[in-house]
Amino acid sequence: MITLRDVHKAFGYNHVLRGVTLDVPKGESMVIIGGSGTGKSVALKCILGLVQPDSGSIEVDGRDVASGDRDAFLARFGMLFQGGALFDSLPVWQNVAFRLVRGSLKRPKAEAREIAIEKLRRVGLKPDQADLFPAELSGGMQKRVGLARAIAADPEIIFFDEPTTGLDPIMSGVINELIREIVVEMGATAMAITHDMTSVRAIADKVAMLHDGVIQWTGPVSQLDASGDPYLDQFIHGRAEGPIEAVR
């Protein structure tokens, strides 16, 4: 579904992506791991066309991301943002139905509200919470609203940017389970970036480690602990000593 070939991206003298090559099969969940500042978010932005690579190619379902109708292209994606990114001034249901009310996928308001309430129910929130504002919800509930918004338009591809940031271990587990259930249920292609190894093991079919601008290792999540790769081994076990230099 998603193919990156020798993708390079620099910001001035900072060469973030130095030849990223990666395949994300249709209907599978790929999780990209790696240290802070290694280019995980930049890679996602390149796929979405929000950042233009300096060289290389990126295709989604066989088509170059830079070609064709942008609205139709972006309509295929859902996104769960790291910080929730909810609109404080809008009630929960309007946050969930934002694309259905204002975007290219416009629906009548009553229908959009109905869809929003159904998606909220899917992530474990009650219909009477649809008219609350984000500030009236806990962090875990806000994350659920963000997940409901990500699936509101039944996208083919869903991106998750650090889905459990700021959540306690129990709520992180709940969100991980929801993500896994929803991705499987929808048959969607999923791509996540995270530092949380518990999330990796819960939601990934395959894992790719981005280090020094390239994919250092990729493989099934079942092979994480027996990869034999010193970079991956150091990262997943959080060791200070190893080939990855810790910034002191």
Image (cartoon, rainbow, N blue to C red):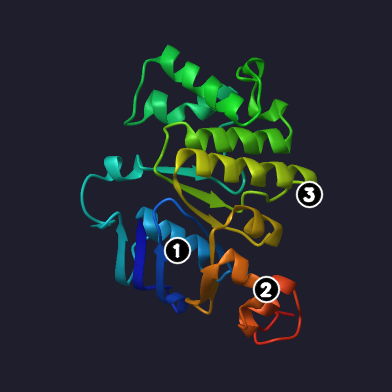
Structural distance between the alpha carbons of marks 1 and 3: 27 Å
Structural distance between the alpha carbons of marks 2 and 1: 25 Å
Q: Which mark is residue 43?
A: 1
> Secondary structure under badge 1?
helix
Residue on which disc 2 sits: 225
> Can residue 36 be seen from the camera position used here?
no
Left/right placement of residue 60 relative to residue 157 reads left
Q: Residue furthest left?
A: 68
At 60% from the left edge and 32% from the top edge, which residue is drawn? 145
At 72% from the left edge and 46% from the top edge, which residue is drawn? 173
> Secondary structure under badge 3?
helix
Residue on which disc 3 sits: 169
- Quadrant where the C terminus sits is bottom right
Which circle's residue, 1 or 3, is located before the other in the chain?
A: 1
Q: Position of residue 187 (x, y in %)?
A: 45, 43
Q: Are marks 1 and 3 in contact (CB under 8 Å)?
A: no
Which of the pair 82/60 is nearer the observer?
60
Structural distance between the alpha carbons of marks 2 and 3: 22 Å
> Can residue 57 be seen from the camera position used here?
yes
Q: Are marks 2 and 1 in contact (CB under 8 Å)?
A: no
Against 170, residue 194 (above or below) is below
